[in-house]
Image (cartoon, grey):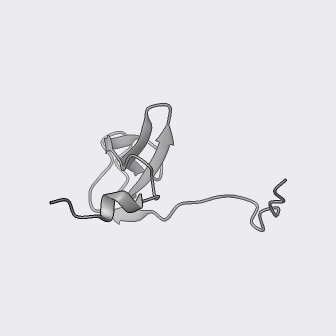
Amino acid sequence: MHNFPRPSTPAVSVERDPVDGVCPECGASQLASYRVLSEGGWWQVVKCQQCLACVSRSPGPLFGAYVPLSSMLQGD
């Protein structure tokens, strides 16, 4: 049986990279790019940090932040 420690932080967060531009919904210039996990898998999104409108969304890495060792091997 595994014993996993209780998380030391009250919330989980992801690093968000600022993006130049203006939100088409509310006009705010607070856009950020980051990965999200939804029912469709991982996505790389650009969202307004003021109203949370989705400005763009594209498929993200298959396993999120996890990079399988096999993907780093060079094939012949």
Q: Residue at the far top: name it.
A: 39
Residue depicted at 41% across the width and 60% down the height: 67
Locate residue 71 relative to residue 51 in the image: left or right. left
**Quarter occupied by the C terminus:** bottom left
Q: Nearer the viewer, residue 71 or 55?
A: 71
Q: Is residue 40 visible?
A: yes
Q: Which percent across, then down, holds residue 46?
A: 35, 50
Q: Residue at the far front: name it.
A: 76
Q: Which percent across, then down, holds residue 32?
A: 39, 58
Q: Nearer the viewer, residue 16 or 51?
A: 16
Q: Residue at the far left: name it.
A: 76
**Above or below for 57 versus 74:** above
Q: Is residue 51 visible?
A: no
Residue depicted at 38% across the width and 41% down the height: 54
Q: Which percent across, then down, holds residue 56?
A: 30, 43
Q: Nearer the viewer, residue 33 or 50?
A: 33
Residue depicted at 85% across the width and 53% down the height: 1
**Above or below for 39 versus 35:** above
Residue depicted at 27% across the width and 62% down the height: 20
Q: Which percent across, then down, holds residue 63?
A: 44, 49
Locate residue 38 relative to residue 21 in the image: left or right. right
